[in-house]
Every structure is written in structure tokens, then in C-alpha cells.
């Protein structure tokens, strides 16, 4: 026969298990609701369900710790030669500025996480690179300095053509991780989320190697 102490211990353990189980069920429910909302609205992939503003270039917007200007876009075609096949790229002109009021640190703009080429009916495309002053990787934007002229490039087929390009801009949030799983409660820049889609008139140019 169980002692009174054993019964009390079992009751306490059962209450602790139920309390934590309730927290996990609530967290799981929140995740499922968010996933359902994203699935139903389509984020920025479809005009009908787009949940962020659509702006016309040239325009400048605040996106987390950066100010992002989008001014122009062009398809640059390189004709076929005896030594190389025809190729093309989509180049989007940007003006990037570090406005990090939280940490006031110099940092590079991660285009693969903060920019997307939005194509109707397809998954958004990350840029192949973002270059500033002809540096393709890790150009550091110094806090407080004027905006730098930069270019985001996307890979396209040699015969690709369009007169309008849509560029999605994401922003990081300065927040802490949830302490529920034992993570640090110190805030930092992460959790990218869409803030706007910029519609950019697009021209076609030809260059030779």
C-alpha cells in the first residue's frame, strides 16, 4: 500500500506534467494558427492575398536596421560568342543605409535573407549577390553614413523579358528569443518578415564581354 507521502508526491508530479503539457499545447496551437494564416493569405506571392503594401519605384522604406531604396531595374543581356553562350541577368539598383538605432553597429546587408524577386505563381527568388562599390560579398554599411549605391543581381535565362519587376523587401526585428525553451532573453536582430513589395519598371540592355 502506498504511503501518504507517495500519494502526495504523485499528485504534485501529475500537476507539474499537466501544467507543462498545457503550455506546449498552447504553443503548438499558436504555430498551427500562424501556419494556416500564411497558407490562406499566400503572403506576398499572390496579389489577391498579399499582406504587405505594394509600392512603385523609386521609393525608400525603413526595413529593420536598414533603410532600403529601390530605384530601377534592367535586364542585361550578353550575346553568344565563339567562346561563351548567351546569358543574361536582372540587375536591381538599390540605395542602402545602416539606420541601426538599437546597436549602432556597422554591418553588411544580407541580400539573400532580406530581398526577394517576387514572381507571380512561383516561389520568391533570392538574389545571386548584392554588390556595393563593385564588392560582391560582405560590403560593410557604417552606421550613420549616407546611403550607398548598390546592385542586387538575379539569374535569368538569356531570352528572359519583362517590363516590370517586383522586389520583396524583408526586415529583421530587434527581439529576444522566447525564454520558454531556455534561450537567451537578450534582444538581437533576427526573425525576418516581409514589409513591402516594390514594383520597378524594367528596361533591357545589351553588353559585350
Image: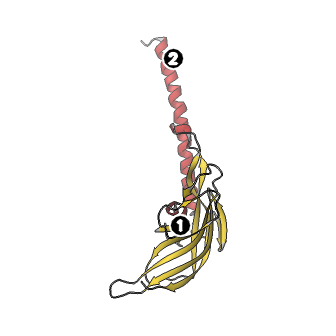
Label 1 Cα neighbours within 10 Å, binned few <14 / some 14-19 / many ≥20? many
Mark drawn on residue 125: none
Q: Is residue 127 visible?
A: no
Circle 1/circle 2 CB separation < 8 Å: no
Vertical arrangement, residue 37 with respect to residue 20, above or below: below
User: Which residue is most to the left?
Assistant: 83
Q: Quadrant of the C terminus?
A: bottom left
Percent x, y for residue 170? Answer: 58, 61
Percent x, y for residue 54? Answer: 65, 69
Q: What colour scheme does the image use?
A: secondary structure
Q: Quadrant of the N terminus?
A: top left
Label 2 Cα neighbours within 10 Å, binned few <14 / some 14-19 / many ≥20? few
Percent x, y for residue 188? Answer: 57, 47
Helix, strand or loop at label 2? It is helix
Marks 1, 2: nearer the viewer: 1
Vertical arrangement, residue 40 with respect to residue 91, above or below: above
Which residue is under mark 1?
A: 116
Mark drawn on residue 8: 2
Vertical arrangement, residue 60 with respect to residue 157, above or below: above
Vertical arrangement, residue 11 with respect to residue 18, above or below: above
Q: How much space separates mark 1 and mark 2, taking CA atoms?
A: 58 Å
Helix, strand or loop at label 1? It is strand
Percent x, y for residue 94? Answer: 59, 70
Amino acid at each position: 500500500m502506498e504511503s501518504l507521502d507517495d500519494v502526495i508526491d504523485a499528485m504534485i508530479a501529475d500537476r507539474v506534467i499537466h501544467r507543462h503539457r498545457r503550455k506546449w499545447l498552447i504553443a503548438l496551437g499558436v504555430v498551427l494558427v500562424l501556419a494556416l494564416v500564411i497558407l490562406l493569405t499566400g503572403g506576398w506571392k499572390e496579389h489577391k492575398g498579399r499582406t504587405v503594401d505594394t509600392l512603385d519605384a523609386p521609393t525608400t522604406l525603413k526595413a529593420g536596421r536598414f533603410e532600403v531604396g529601390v530605384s530601377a531595374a534592367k535586364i542585361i543581356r550578353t550575346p553568344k560568342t565563339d567562346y561563351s553562350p548567351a546569358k543574361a541577368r536582372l540587375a536591381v539598383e538599390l540605395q542602402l543605409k545602416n539606420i541601426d538605432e538599437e546597436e549602432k553597429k556597422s554591418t553588411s546587408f544580407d541580400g539573400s535573407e532580406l530581398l526577394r524577386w517576387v514572381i507571380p505563381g512561383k516561389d520568391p527568388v533570392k538574389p545571386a549577390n548584392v554588390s556595393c562599390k563593385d564588392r560582391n560579398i560582405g560590403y560593410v554599411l557604417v552606421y550613420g553614413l549616407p546611403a550607398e549605391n548598390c546592385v542586387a543581381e538575379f539569374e535569368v535565362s538569356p531570352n528572359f523579358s519583362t517590363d516590370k519587376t517586383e522586389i520583396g523587401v524583408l526586415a529583421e526585428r530587434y527581439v529576444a528569443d522566447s525564454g520558454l525553451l531556455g534561450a537567451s532573453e537578450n534582444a538581437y536582430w533576427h526573425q525576418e518578415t516581409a514589409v513591402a513589395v516594390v514594383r520597378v519598371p524594367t528596361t533591357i540592355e545589351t553588353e559585350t564581354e
